[in-house]
C-alpha cells in the first residue's frame, strides 16, 4: 500500500458523516504535508472500555474531536472521556464545534493547522512518515529493538518473526505462535484477544494483563497443565487486530511473563507485561 491509497481510504472512512468529513478533509488538504501521518477513528484505551477519536496525528501526539449537536447534551461525559484519554496517553486533544457558522469552523481549523505545524517544527526528533518502512521488518532489525512507542504492526506472522533472527518461507504460518529463534525461554505469540470459538482471550484496558481462557473446562485444564510444565514462560505478543483500514495485522503489545499465582481455571493463563521493549536480531534463512 502506498500513501495515496492509505490517505484515500482514511478520508473515505468519514464520508458517511458529512460534518466530520468536511473538517477532516479540510485539515488534511490545507496542511498539504505528506510527511505527517493521520488516522481517522483512532481507538484509545480508557480505565473502563475504549474511546475513539475522530482524527489523530501520531507524530505530534494530537487528537482532533469534531463536536456535532448531540455533544451539547453530554458535555460532562465528554469532559470525563477527554480526561481519560489525556491521562492514558499524555496526548493533546483539540475540538471543532461544527454547530457554529462555517467561517468560525474554518477559523478553528486554521488554528489547529498552525498548532500541528508548530508541534512538528518544535520536535527535534520528528521523523517523516514512511509507510513502507513502518511495516518493514528491516526497519526494526537495523534499529535493534521494538518498543510500544513504535506503534509497530506487521501484515504477516512471517514478517514479524523475521525481526527475531530467522527468515521463514513467505507462506509459513503458525496456529498461535513460534519459538523465539534466539531466546530459548520465549515464544512469539499471535493471539486473538477476543472470543474465538472455545477461546475467550482478553486484554486489560491498560494492556498490561492478558487472560488466555479456554471455555471448555477439560481442554482448559489440559492447556494450563501443559503450559505450566514448559520452559517458555515469556511471550512476545503481536495481537491479531484490524488496522485502521480494516486489514488484518499483527500489532506489538510488549513482552509478557506467566503469572503462575494468578493462573486458574477461572482466570485462565494470566500473562503480565514486564517490558515495553524487546530486542531484534538479524535473521538467517530457514
Image: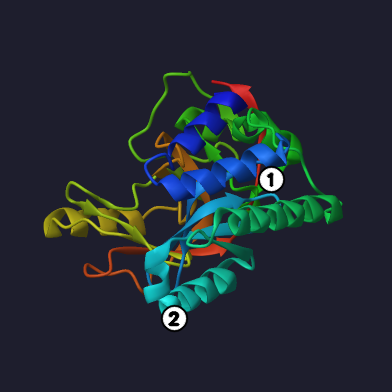
Q: Which disc is residue 279 wearing?
A: none
**For mark 1, what is the residue?**
145
In the displayed structure image, the side of residue 123 where residue 89 appears, left or right: left
Residue farthest along the bottom direction in this orientation: 76
Q: For label 1, count other residues whose C-alpha is less than 10 Å away and answer few (under 14), some (14-19) or many (20+).
A: some
Residue on which the image places disc 2 = 76
Q: Is residue 136 left or right of residue 44?
A: right
Using residue 91 as the reference point, say whether residue 153 is left or right of it.
left
Quarter of the image with the N terminus is top right
- Check if mark 1's residue and mark 2's residue have beta carbons within 8 Å: no
Relative placement, left or right, of 88 versus 200 is right
Task: Give how far across and how far down residue 155 sits, in percent.
Answer: 48, 31
Q: As rendered, which of 207 and 144 lies closer to the eye?
A: 207
Which of the two discs, 1 and 2, sits closer to the camera? 2
The secondary structure type at the circle numbered 2 is helix
Q: Secondary structure at mark 1?
A: strand
Name which residue lies at 69% across and 32% down. 130
CA gap, disc 1 and disc 2: 42 Å
Name above or below for residue 278 compared with residue 31.
below
Write the residue at 47% across / 78% down: 80
Q: Position of residue 149 (x, y in %)?
A: 65, 53
Q: Position of residue 160 (x, y in %)?
A: 53, 35
Nearest to N terminus: mark 1 or mark 2: 2
Amino acid at each position: 500500500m502506498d500513501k495515496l491509497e492509505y490517505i484515500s481510504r482514511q478520508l473515505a472512512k468519514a464520508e458517511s458523516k458529512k460534518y466530520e468529513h468536511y473538517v477532516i478533509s479540510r485539515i488534511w488538504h490545507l496542511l498539504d504535508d505528506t510527511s505527517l501521518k493521520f488516522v481517522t477513528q483512532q481507538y484509545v484505551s480508557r480505565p473502563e472500555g475504549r474511546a475513539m477519536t475522530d482524527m489523530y496525528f501520531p507524530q505530534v501526539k494530537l487528537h482532533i474531536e469534531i463536536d456535532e449537536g448531540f455533544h451539547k447534551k453530554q458535555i460532562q461525559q465528554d469532559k470525563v472521556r477527554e480526561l481519560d484519554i489525556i491521562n492514558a496517553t499524555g496526548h493533546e486533544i483539540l475540538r471543532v464545534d461544527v454547530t457554529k457558522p462555517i467561517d468560525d469552523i474554518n477559523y478553528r481549523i486554521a488554528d489547529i493547522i498552525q498548532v500541528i505545524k508548530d508541534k512538528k517544527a518544535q520536535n527535534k526528533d520528528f521523523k517523516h512518515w514512511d509507510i513502507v518502512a513502518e511495516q518493514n521488518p528491516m526497519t526494526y532489525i537495523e534499529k535493534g529493538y521494538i518498543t510500544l512507542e513504535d506503534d509497530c504492526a506487521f501484515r504477516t506472522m512471517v514478517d514479524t518473526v523475521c525481526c527475531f533472527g530467522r527468515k521463514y518461507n513467505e507462506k509459513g504460518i503458525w496456529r498461535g505462535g513460534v519459538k523465539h529463534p534466539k531466546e530459548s525461554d520465549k515464544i512469539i505469540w499471535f493471539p486473538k484477544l477476543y472470543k474465538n470459538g472455545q477461546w475467550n482471550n482478553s486484554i486489560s484496558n491498560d494492556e498490561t494483563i492478558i487472560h488466555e481462557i479456554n471455555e471448555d473446562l477439560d481442554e482448559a485444564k489440559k492447556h494450563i497443565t501443559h503450559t505450566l510444565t514448559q520452559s517458555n514462560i515469556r511471550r512476545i505478543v503481536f495481537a491479531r487486530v484490524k488496522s485502521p483500514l480494516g486489514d488484518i495485522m499483527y500489532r506489538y503489545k510488549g513482552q509478557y511473563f506467566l503469572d503462575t499465582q494468578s493462573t486458574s481455571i477461572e482466570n485462565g493463563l494470566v500473562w503480565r507485561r514486564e517490558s515495553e521493549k524487546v530486542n531484534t536480531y538479524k535473521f538467517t534463512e530457514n
